[in-house]
Image: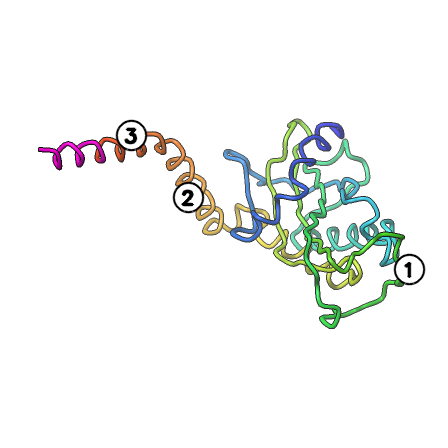
Amino acid sequence: MNNKIFAALIGTISAALICACSFTQEIKEGISFRGLDKFYIEKPICPIGIFDACGGREIIDTKLYKAIEECLKEKGMTRVSNKNEAQIIFVPLWNISEREIPTYNTPYNLNLPVQPLPIGGNPYKKAVSLEMQAWFPDMDSWVWRGFSPMEVSPLMMTSGSIRDQVDWCFKHFPPEEYPSNLEKRRDEIADKKYEEKNQFNNVLIEDRKNRDTISSERN
């Protein structure tokens, strides 16, 4: 399953923030999380070296694991250490964008050591935002995604900012408890599919109107 997860996530590294601007969750049709309360957390996926200047990848991963576990515990769920016992597998994904975050906008609870930047690195002009994907053990694609609209400089990652991003990702999880948000998103998807399906017909209609207009002008 790890190879399938990696392959499916590669294409979302740079694009997910666009999705996050308009909605905070996405779910595949027919998926339900009712009665599922045991989860496993995969190793977070992020660009190589992006967190080197704020203590390193392992520190960020540890704080992220803790934030996810605490957030979902508040929702009545239990983290398991054995993936085979999990009903849901969560895959954290750090998306990166080229954006300079003002350094004076310091997050609270700043407790990570700051280390010298790697040669050629410039995290001042980058921002990270968290995406959370849910996978079912017997499926080869994600079934739900939650997004954080926050953009944080890799230099300013803290326990507080990480927990904030996690809370945003799980703001409407499980989706069954937030039907209004879920239905709104499904309506958006249905409208988009309808527009895409009828796009060709609309072109034909407009072309017919133009030809009729030209014909009437000639007469």
In the rendered image, the quadrant that contains the C terminus is top left
Q: Is residue 71 left or right of residue 187?
A: right
* Amino acid under disc 1: Pro
Tag 3 residue: 204
Q: Earlier in the sequence, mark 3 or mark 1?
A: 1
Question: Which residue is depicted at the point 75% across and 64% down?
Answer: 160
Tag 2 residue: 187
Residue in the foreground of this view, choosing between 169 and 137: 169
Q: Residues within 10 Å of mark 1 (few under 14, many from 20)?
A: few
Q: Verify whether residue 216 appears in magenta.
A: yes
- Residue range in magenta is 210-219
* Amino acid under disc 3: Leu
In the picture, residue 105 is in which quadrant? bottom right
* Magenta: main secondary structure: helix
Vertical placement of residue 183 versus 28, above or below? below
Mark number, residue 174: none
Residue 194 location in percent, x, y?
Answer: 37, 35
Q: CA distance from mark 2 to mark 3?
A: 26 Å
Q: How is the image coloured?
A: rainbow
Question: Which residue is depicted at the point 75% across and 45% down?
Answer: 79
Question: Which residue is depicted at the point 75% across and 51% down?
Answer: 69
Q: Residues within 10 Å of mark 3 (few under 14, many from 20)?
A: few
Looking at the image, do the residues carrying marks 2 and 3 touch, with CB atoms under 8 Å apart? no
Q: Is residue 14 left or right of residue 56?
A: left
* Amino acid under disc 2: Asp
Residue 190 location in percent, x, y?
Answer: 41, 38
Tag 1 residue: 116
Foreground mark, 2 or 3, reads 3
Q: Earlier in the sequence, mark 2 or mark 3?
A: 2
Q: CA distance from mark 2 to mark 1?
A: 48 Å
Residue 12 location in percent, x, y?
Answer: 65, 39
Residue 133 location in percent, x, y?
Answer: 66, 41
